[in-house]
């Protein structure tokens, strides 16, 4: 029999505990990635830092790739939440998308080790990581489509525009991490893509 005054069921407590455990795991992975990139994210150390058993960690995340792609989705979700609390500046769709993707680019480039870890995980992701990759793409698409529409309704092609632009955005991050282009080149190429894709919205 439940104690008087207890309104939370065991299932709800377990769900809350699981969410807390997952959050600790992701935060530990982000800290390790920020310290030394992809190679520094070792599952045993993630388990130790987050205070979970190694077997428990693998039940949540079957591999380092699963974990880091999930961490990227988590990072983008936080960025999206911050954007939702403010009005995106810009008179046109092009200006608003430029503002959002510049913010995202600067956020990643502030921490090259973390960016390297997450992008490498995205590149290594196979079909078994499809759900996590879809979460990353959904977060990116949501930010871009919100910027495109501004205060208006979502257009029939906005999701396609967002898909193209995020593909360019990811490709330029990969080139930057590989040392093939500078950070200035990254933004020049992304800005060009935005203007070409959204020119009918200008």
Image: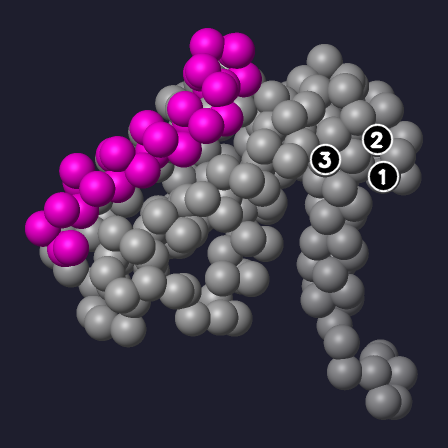
61 lies left or right of 177 = right
Residue situated in front as seen by the camera: 176 or 36: 176
Circle 2: element type = helix
In the image, the segment drawn in magenta is 174-202
Q: Is residue 5 on the magenta stretch? A: no
Question: Which residue corresponds to mark 3?
Answer: 30
Give the residue displayed 49% in from the left and 62% down from the top.
83
Mark positioned earlier in the residue sequence (2 or 3): 3
Q: Give neighbour class at mark 1: few <14, some 14-19, many 20+ (Cα, 10 Å).
A: some
Residue 67 appearing in the image: no
Question: Which residue corresponds to mark 2?
Answer: 47
State the image coordinates of residue 142 (x, y, percent, origin top left): 37, 53
Residue situated in front as seen by the camera: 156 or 188: 188
67 lies left or right of 137 = right
Compared to residue 93, the image places residue 126 above or below, namely above
Q: Are the residues tagged 1 and 2 within 8 Å (C-beta)?
A: yes
Q: Is residue 188 on the magenta stretch? A: yes
Q: Give neighbour class at mark 3: few <14, some 14-19, many 20+ (Cα, 10 Å).
A: many
Mark positioned earlier in the residue sequence (3 or 1): 3
Given this view, does label 2 or label 3 mark the residue nearer the observer? 3
Circle 1: element type = helix
**Quarter location, residue 37:** top right
State the image coordinates of residue 105 (x, y, percent, origin top left): 49, 38
Give the residue displayed 45% in from the left and 15% down from the top.
181
Q: How many marks?
A: 3
Quarter of the figure with the C terminus: bottom left
Residue situated in front as seen by the camera: 183 or 88: 183
Question: Which residue corresponds to mark 1?
Answer: 50
Q: How far apart are marks 2 and 3 (CA)?
A: 13 Å
């Amino acid at each position: 029999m439940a104690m008087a005054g207890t309104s939370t069921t065991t299932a709800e407590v377990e769900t809350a505990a699981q969410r807390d455990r997952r959050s600790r795991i992701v935060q530990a992975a982000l800290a390790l990635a920020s310290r030394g990139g992809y190679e520094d994210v070792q599952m045993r150390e993630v388990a130790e830092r987050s205070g979970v058993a190694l077997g428990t960690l693998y039940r949540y995340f079957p591999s380092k790739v699963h974990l880091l792609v999930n961490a990227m989705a988590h990072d983008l979700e936080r960025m999206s939440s911050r954007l939702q609390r403010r009005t995106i500046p810009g008179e046109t769709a092009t200006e608003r998308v430029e503002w959002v993707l510049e913010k995202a680019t600067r956020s990643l480039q502030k921490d090259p080790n973390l960016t390297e870890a997450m992008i490498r995980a995205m590149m290594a992701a196979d079909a078994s990581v499809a759900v996590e990759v879809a979460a990353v793409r959904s977060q990116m698409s949501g930010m871009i489509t919100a910027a495109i529409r501004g205060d208006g309704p979502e257009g029939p092609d906005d999701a396609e525009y967002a898909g193209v632009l995020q593909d360019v955005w990811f490709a330029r991050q990969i080139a930057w991490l590989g040392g093939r282009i500078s950070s200035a080149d990254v933004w020049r190429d992304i800005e060009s893509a935005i203007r070409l894709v959204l020119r009918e919205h200008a």
